[in-house]
Amino acid sequence: MTTHRPGTIGALAAIIREAAASGQSLAVTGSGSRPDMGPGAADAVLDVTGIDGEVLHDPAELLLTVPASAPLAEVEALLARAGQCLAFEPPSPGPIWGRGSGTIGGAIAAGLSGPRRPFAGAARDHVLGITGVTGRGEIFKAGGKVLKNVTGFDLPRLLTGSRGTLAVITEITLKVLPLAPAQATLLLPAATVQAAVRIMADALMVDGGITGAAWHDEQVMLRLESGAAVLPALIDAARLRLPSFDVLDDAASRRIWTDISSLNGVKLANHCVWRCPVPANRVPALAGMVAAVSGGVRLDWGGALAWILLPPDQADLDVHALVEAAAGRDGHAQRLRLPAGITSTIPAQPRIDPGIAALSARVKAQFDPAFILSPAAVPGGSA
């Protein structure tokens, strides 16, 4: 199979125009760190990691502009040196797929957000501007470097999570936020999903500095962040309204939330990994169905994100149907990982109703009328 690796945005646009004219489909890819979320089958591969660019970081304005090919780990290290971070905590793909931490472009194209999602917003909320090339071969620049500079379609939000199906992203401008000066994690025992959801709901009823709420291995974890002088008072206040808990100090707390975000430390070698955003009050029903087939459940987002880990003999379990039974149209399921050597008849992507599928097709036609950019990865596709 032919692989195109342009070195400039102009060369990229020329390749796309030629492919559109000939009807050749292109699998848009970066470092390949998220293979099960990849572009799927196509006539040729379009590798965008050769398009470099300048990194512009303005710490005072909380702005960062980077080429999409910039390694995610390097972007996070750059911000950490300035006492800042990507507030949506993009999960590192390394622990799940074992292919490195990927690029910032891959993180935005995938659109996944980590534990801070309910408290600081999703990935799309932090993307201010995008430069790229449409399926017509047109170079565009959308958005800007201030939040109010949005007119017409909000293309940065639309393209975040589009997986290379609408346009090829080459440069991204992000809003970044300061790292919290001090952090601690409260550890509370919770033997069941029901108990965990109840504890997290009680904790989140009060604005007590919580920026993370997760559960696994019969333990609820609540992250508190604030100034160093205020943090002890937040912990004392939590003791008055929550069951007894232990406390992880700053360094240990930061490590555990890095692990929670990416399932780091979880033995995934033989497991199918599903990611299911579901209303927290529907999670116990979903967890009960998963437990009946010996699957494991981990919770994030205060219970509103369920990670389902299935043994290989359950690869054909229809998790989409389980989520629909538990939450109706209020939740969805996406398989992020299928173990090597295991096949499944169940599609990885969320099922969508015909009306949304028709809308997605119309949007796709506006950006990519020849349907050449990662066609297998479109909503309802087979990638």
Image (cartoon, helix red, strand yellow):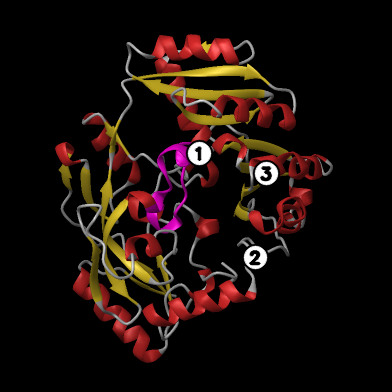
Closer to the N terminus: mark 3 or mark 2?
A: 3
- Circle 1: element type: helix
Q: Can you give x and y, in whole percent of width and height, for residue 78 in the image?
A: 24, 37
Residue 170 disc label:
none
Sequence-first tag of 1 and 2? 1
Q: Position of residue 317 (x, y in %)?
A: 77, 55
Q: Secondary structure at mark 2?
A: loop
Q: Which residue is mark 3?
A: 308
Judge the density around disc 2: few (<14), some (14-19), many (≥20) Cα neighbours within 10 Å: some
Picture layout, residue 314 above or below residue 300: below
Q: CA distance from mark 3 to mark 2?
A: 17 Å
Instruction: Give the amino acid type for the residue marked by disc 2 in the picture.
Output: Arg
Which residue corresponds to mark 1? 262
231 displayed left or right of 377: left
Percent of width and height locating residue 266: 60, 33
- Name the N-terminal-most of marks 3 and 1: 1
**Residue highlighted by disc 2:** 351
Give the SS element for disc 3.
strand
Choose top left, top right, bottom left or bottom right for residue 250. top left
Label 3 or label 2, whichever lies nearer to me, is 2
Quote the CA–CA distance across marks 3 and 1. Answer: 13 Å
* Residue range of the region highlighted in magenta in the rendering: 107-124
Residue 227 makes an appearance in the image: yes
